[in-house]
Amino acid sequence: VESGFKVQLSPSSTAAVFQKGAAHIMSENLCFPAKLVSGHIMNLIEKGVDRIFFPMVFYEESSFSDAANSYNCPIVTGYAQVIKNVIDPHGKYKIQLDMPPVNFNDKRLLKKVCLNYLESLGVEHGVAARAFDKALESQRQFKGQVRDVAAEILENAKEDGRPVILLLGRPYHIDPLINHKIPDILINFGLDVITEDSIPLDDEQTLNNRNV
């Protein structure tokens, strides 16, 4: 948006969205999150977007200063290539599929890739740089808000004597169709739920034993 583009998101995941892309699933052994991607891509195609942004994310941001790595699984990293070959948005529907390589764990490299991508679409360098900086700041503020909420949940649970569940997962587990509403089920049992990325930790927090 800061670079002058109108952003169109696919809808929240539903069984209907999944079915929309079922014909494009190439393997029954594929994980459900990957299968779901095809439906979201077909939804965007039906909406008549000009381009589809599907970056190849190799590394996530590390949550601990001494983490061994934050490498994504090959399916997460390379599934944009599968979509390109199977659905072929550009060849069949004249919709460009943009697949820039992204590394969230190296801000210098991330900025270089983002600016190169935006400039390839005609965005001026200064505009792209300001948009990138604003995006980082927005993410930083959001992260702070998430941790503040988790800290409040922990404090209230301690005062009331309620148990707290730390729900570990991958980024795509935020999707209710993928997580099968497990957070809601736990909450309905009278438990409080926080995620591992919401724990109020110091920036230089280390792992006690990362090999466990």
Image (spheres, rainbow, N blue to C red):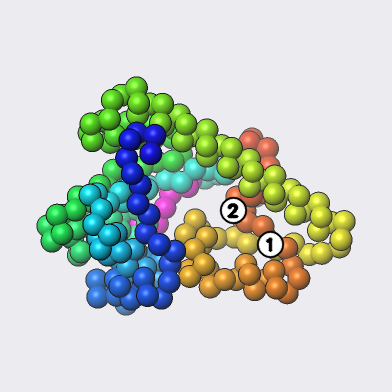
Read off the residue under disc 2: 211
SS type, badge 1: strand
In percent of width and height, residue 175 lies at 49, 63
Quarter of the figure that contains the N terminus: top left
Can residue 46 be seen here? The reply is yes
Residue 131 or residue 170, whichever sits in front: 131
In percent of width and height, residue 158 lies at 84, 56
Determine the image quadrant of residue 66. Answer: top right
Residue 99's disc number: none
In percent of width and height, residue 30 lies at 35, 71
Question: Which amino acid lies under the numbered mark 1 shown in the image of this protein?
Answer: Val
Q: Which residues are magenta?
A: 69-74
Q: Nearer the viewer, mark 1 or mark 2?
A: 1
Q: Residues within 10 Å of mark 1 (few under 14, many from 20)?
A: some
How many numbered discs, if any?
2
In percent of width and height, residue 100 lies at 28, 43
SS type, badge 2: loop
Read off the residue under disc 1: 193
Quarter of the figure that contains the C terminus: bottom right
Q: Earlier in the sequence, mark 1 or mark 2?
A: 1
